[in-house]
Amino acid sequence: MISEIQTFIENKSNTKEAFDSLNQMIQYVNNKKVTILMIVEDLSDTLVNTDPKIRAKGVELLIKVFSNCDVSIITPKIASVILKFCLERLNDLHSLQSLLEGILYITENLEIDSEIVNDIPKTLFDELTIQGYQQTVRHVIFKIYDSLVEKYLSELKKIEDIFVPGFVQTVEGEKDPRNIMIIFKIIKIILKEMNYKPYIEDIFEIVFCYFPISFKSPPGNVIKITTEDLKNGLRECLTAVPEISKFAIPQLIEKLSSRLDNTKRDSIDILVAGGEKYDIEDYINNLEKLTEILRDEAFDNAGESLESLYLDAISSFTNIYSRGGNECLDKYIKEMTSKPISYIKDYGHPRGKFSRNIICAVIKENEYAFNKIINEIFPDLMDKIEQPNPPSVQSFLMEYVRSILSIANLRFIGKDNIIYQYKDILFKEFNELKKSDDDNDFKKDMEISSIGGLYEMANLEEFLPADQIKDIINDFNNKLLSDSREEIRKLCLKNILGLSMKNSDLITTITLPLLYNKLQADMIDSNYEWVLQSYEDITIECKFYEDTISKLISLYEDGINGKQNTDYLTKLLESVKNIIDRGIQKEINNKDIIVNCFPIFKDNILRIVIHNSVQQREELQNIDIISLIFQKFQSIMDEDKNKEFNEEILNIFVNKKLLNSMDIDGNIEFNPLNENSPKAQTCLLNILISITCNISQDIFNNTTAKVINEEFLNTLVKSIINTLNSNYANLVSKFISLYCIRFNDEKCIQNRIKAWIENDIYSVINSNMVFKETTIILFSWFLKVLFVKSNPDVSKYTLDLINLIPNESHATSCVNGMKTIFDVETFPIEANSLYTIDTEFEGNLINTLLNELIVIYKSSEIKNIHVIVALGVLLKLSNVKSITCKEEVKPIMLYALTLEDSSVLVSSLEFLIVLTSALPNELRSDLFILIKYLLRLTKAKNSLAYTIKVRVLSLRFLDLISKTYDNYELLPMKQNVINELDCVLDDNKKYVRKMAVHCRNQWFTLVN
Amino acid sequence: MTVLNANPVVYEVSKKININDIKYNINEGDETREPIDAEEIFELIRTINDPEHPLTLEQLNVIRLESIHVEDSNNYVSVTFFPTIPHCSMATLIGLCIRVRLLRSLPSRFKIDIFVAEGTHQSDAAVNKQLNDKERVAAALENSHLLKVVNQCLIEKE
């Protein structure tokens, strides 16, 4: 062991020798060959060596071994010995860093005696002058304090009369943001848990010296501390206890008149945040000064970004001063409002608008202040608005009244309020306001004030009679539908939504039908989306789901009959989906209201789609959305309702029993599970599939599994084998596979599948029949079931599928089949909720298939591109790390980059991208050739096969390479890449250019 | 270095889109040319960082979509930018950053002009002259320190 010690001490700490010998010693300790105490003994001379460097190395070695060995080996006794050792040696400057790290390790990871715990801060206070050390040492010291407070707070409390002053004195002047965060944290704890009162002034000083925080996080922000974190920390410290206010309030008020906006912002922030905790007396003592600055600053900053800050602060201070009783609040109100009120009185003062804002801010959040000011100003104001005023004055005054009414609504004023005496005048004046015919600059402002004022009046409790409210809503409706200005339309929508709480009846009987009529009338209007959106918003606000959904569906039906385009129909269904979605979120405690809409939706939509299909019309493109809406309903309905629904669907699709309400008279029978059905019918199978995915296992066992028997499945299998209709084959096979996956007698169903494969499918595949495509589709879906169930026979069958690939006419179906088997997104539900895959089984199967594909590839003389595509597809769907034959696959995939077939290129690029991000080392040696190929692929002019997707993938790959590999590997190729990409910057396609710019910039930033 | 404009007005910007998140509706067969337009140029320069603040030029409203002029067929681009204050000493550096970004991102067939908007800077004429003098730009970019500053401004934040 001596030799390891020697090696460590003689070499620099970052050398391999030192590292190895250290590791060796840690191993010894972990294997219990030596103990820590033995190391201390061996080191005894070194630890007291007169050469400080050797001494420091000795300490470093001891601490490193100690803090890296297994925690279980360290007994409390050793821990306390080492801790004492570290504490005693703290005055040895050369070993300081290691000693502190030792202390930190012990405080963070080990349990130590309470007596020794208290020695730590005492020694730290006595021995260290923190600000004399470099940053790394300081940070360790602060981390020690942090862990002490975290773990041993109760012990520290016992020595609070030493800890508090000691800490406060030693931390002064710290600049490292990480340490400052710790200071803030500990100060907060001191203020909360310890006796801070004798030291409050000192505490205030060390904290307040950081005000205002002007920290700018460094690029990349490695320390992960933001300005906000620091600001929050500072604010919480400064507002933690009432005693601070004596010092803080005068200082903060002074800072309010600072030149810098940020300082003003932060001062206000703390003054307002202190409102709850601070001593109200301190606020009262500074009232005049504070109000003067607030008022003046609010005037000076009027119209600028700080205006709202000051106004909000003025509102908050009303509440803060209300803590001091009415007398105190009266004083505040007087100070704050007397000047603004006098400014407003002559109505022409340029500061009128800002005075108005200040007055409103004062009364906004306090009832007493509101009543007091309103009683004072309202009668005069009313007198004035009734007089003939020039438009500028009238517009100003009415906006003033509107603001007051809006506050009145916030304060829920009662009928005894003075405002109620003027309701007739107000209603008249606000109506007059919008009628103004003069084309002056204030027309629009007046209109907005009028809309706002009428809204506020309609919202006040028992302020207006019902017929007047109705008039107002009618007015909003007209504007909502026909005003050409978006601003006004939005305002009206907002107001209607605001009124819907109290006037739900009026809105559902007037507004919604109006919107519906509009939707019916013009479908191509540019306002269409706006109207639909409003319809949606109002429905949700008024909880008028059922009616709207049925109306939207009837619009959908009209749209189908009127042969509207898919976009239009999709929008309607999207709207239904949004209503249900938002409804579910809003009615979280009352989902029944949404569930109640289900029968209407279900009956109508099924009637419509089935009717459409039996009329031999075109296929509907929005079945996915319909399935999605059904899924949403399924998720909120109870088990019984779900079961009932599933039975109904099975009756329709399997037993062909349509509901009476559907009343269908079509040209042909409704039977989507028949291979001769038109596409318009088979596409509805998506609904059946989606629902079967989403029902619970119980429901499946009790309904679906009972309705569909073996004989029925047999018929379906036969029908697929005997048809040429691949769309039908795909959907029905998908359904059969889903059924088999969910079927609970696994053994039985797997044997059945094997029988189908060996008897029915193989007879077609091995025959000379030309039409094998549908059979291959069914085959793949069966293989998916066997794969999901980890059936050992699946590899044999899949190899048979793969062996069909070299045959040109089946290659594409076989490759698609492979996708079907391994893709997790084949069903319209998350795969996890249907089945779980045994990853080991999957890995083995994929490796077997890959090996077989490689054999096929090598054995054929002409390089079959389908084999490469299949390889690419399989590789992309697999977990790259579990592939065993990477070495053989790699050259094939690289070779594929030279071929001129876009599907081959895409599959190869996709695989190589995945490979590079997962295992960059695999391609390290091929970088040069790879980049050469990729650069060729980025240029459209080289080949027609270099499609947009190929170019984009190549650029994405080049970008990935620049981020993955080290600069020294890439620099030799940098200039070439940049030059070659120059012409890609002029690609025909925007997106390719965008990728090229991004990629090229990435390469530009590579430097030595 | 004291910051000249310590509290600039920050404007709301559209969300930055991660290039890998864009779902491009690829119509493989369609290879018709989509000409380079003002929006594309704006997209290129909006993410340039201001030399003084941790904000982008778009956030400071230094560059605006409407002040970009592009003629794809005539190989011409001009960008006019608006310094936040008339005595901004960073105006030339900002102009240089815009130029370098465009040099690196546009095909070499383009002639690029960069201007300070008239009346927004006390010495706009001098700055314009400096920014559009090919040799002075080339000389500036040979200065490794300056290039480092420019590259810093061009780093796209995640």
Image: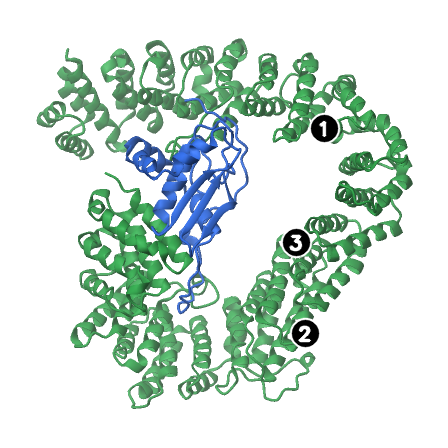
Residue A891: x %, y % from top left: 19, 63
- Check the residue under mark 3 and report the chain it is in: A
Near mark 1 (Cα within 10 A), the count class, few <14, some 14-19 or many ≥20, is: many
Determine whether A291 is above or below A883 in the image.
above
Front residue (pair A56, A510): A510
Residue at (79% x, 49% y) in the render: A502
Instruction: Residue type at mark 3: give it.
Output: Glu
In the picture, the disc for residue A558 is 2
Residue at (73% x, 30% y) in the render: A357
Front residue (pair A15, A648): A15
Q: Earlier in the sequence, mark 2 or mark 1?
A: 1
Front residue (pair A695, B101): B101
Residue A722: x %, y % from top left: 41, 89
Instruction: Measure the alpha-carbon separation of dots 3 and 2.
Output: 30 Å
Is the Cβ of the residue at disc 3 closer than 8 Å to that at disc 2?
Answer: no
A830 vs A573, left or right, is left
Residue at (46% x, 33% y) in the render: B125
SS class of the residue under badge 1?
Answer: helix
- Chain letter for the blue part: B
